Amino acid sequence: LAKTTQPISMDSYEGQEVNITCSHNNIATNDYITWYQQFPSQGPRFIIQGYKTKVTNEVASLFIPADRKSSTLSLPRVSLSDTAVYYCLVGDEGDSSYKLIFGSGTRLLVRP
Amino acid sequence: GAVVSQHPSWVICKSGTSVKIECRSLDFQATTMFWYRQFPKQSLMLMATSNEGSKATYEQGVEKDKFLINHASLTLSTLTVTSAHPEDSSFYICSARGPRAADTQYFGPGTRLTVL
């Protein structure tokens, strides 16, 4: 079973900031939190990864509270091309392969 | 980020034939590779995990004799769909990562398999 829960869908408008929150209550000590973006008929594209506190790169920020039971992906000033499915995943350290089990993801629709 | 390639990007075959899909990590050594499949409008489903030089570990419900996985080197894994049938038509995606917990898993572009 996926270890994360996130909203099924979100709507936004061009130029707005979008925050997608993911719940991972059973995150393990060694688990990292990773977010991916997927367009139709393409493989998931890495967005950002973090362990705790805040991580920022050129496309997004990731906020992780101290208890690490949730995380929030922040996309500043979205554009139409950000319409995609966003997945939040935590690695499963159980068998040392850190396999990622995908949940349903969040379908983000950016409107003009 | 690191690059993972897949070949072919799409394939059409007749029912009963076997199809091989290659997954390569182009600029890093992938100690672990994963194979997923995705049906339209659905999420990715993990099929199997393979470590270089070891037998693959299959998820529950995935037939190991039908989906043969080989991870012969640190940069190459192959998935062979044996005796393919129309219900095997799907989007197959591989991913690769290094050995550490902090290593990011990078995904290939996917292979669209259509079995007639």
Image: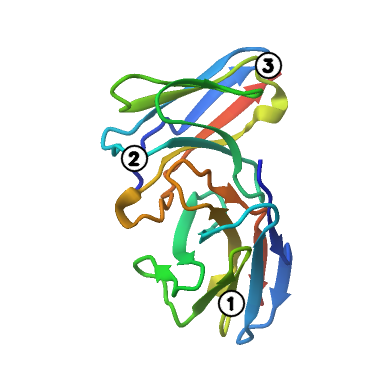
- Pointer 3 residue: A14
Question: Residue A83 placed where, x, y %?
Answer: 64, 31
Task: Compute the Cα span from label 1 to label 3.
Answer: 43 Å
Given residues B115 and B30, the one toward you in this image is B30
User: Quadrant location of the C terminus of chain B?
Assistant: bottom right
A40 sits to left or right of B70: right
Query: Is residue B81 at least partly visible in the picture?
Result: yes
Image point (69%, 52%), residue name: B27
Query: In the image, B20: left or right of A74?
Result: right
Residue A1, visible in the rendered structure: no
- Disc number for residue A30: 2
User: What separation in Å lies between label 3 and label 2 (alpha carbons)?
Assistant: 37 Å
Tell me the SS state at disc 3.
loop
Would you call the spot at circle 1 few (<14 residues within 10 Å), some (14-19), or many (20 or more)? some
Across and down, in percent, residue B113 comes to 65, 68
Count of numbered tags: 3
Q: Chain of mark 2?
A: A
Q: Are marks 3 and 2 in contact (CB under 8 Å)?
A: no
Chain letter belonging to callout 1: B
Badges 2 and 1, same chain: no
The residue under label 1 is which amino acid type? Thr
Name the image quarter holding residue B112: bottom right
In this rendering, the label closer to the viewer, 2 or 1: 2
Give the residue at mark 1: B80
- Residue that appears at 65% across and 19% down: A78
Quadrant (top left/top right/bottom left/bottom right) for the N terminus of chain B: top right
Label 3 or label 2, whichever comes before in sequence order:
3
Pick whichever, A51 or A84, lies toward us: A51
Q: Amino acid at mark 3?
A: Glu
The kind of residue on which mark 2 rests is: Asn
Mark closer to the observer (3, 2): 2
Q: Which is more toward the observer, A48 or B31?
A: B31
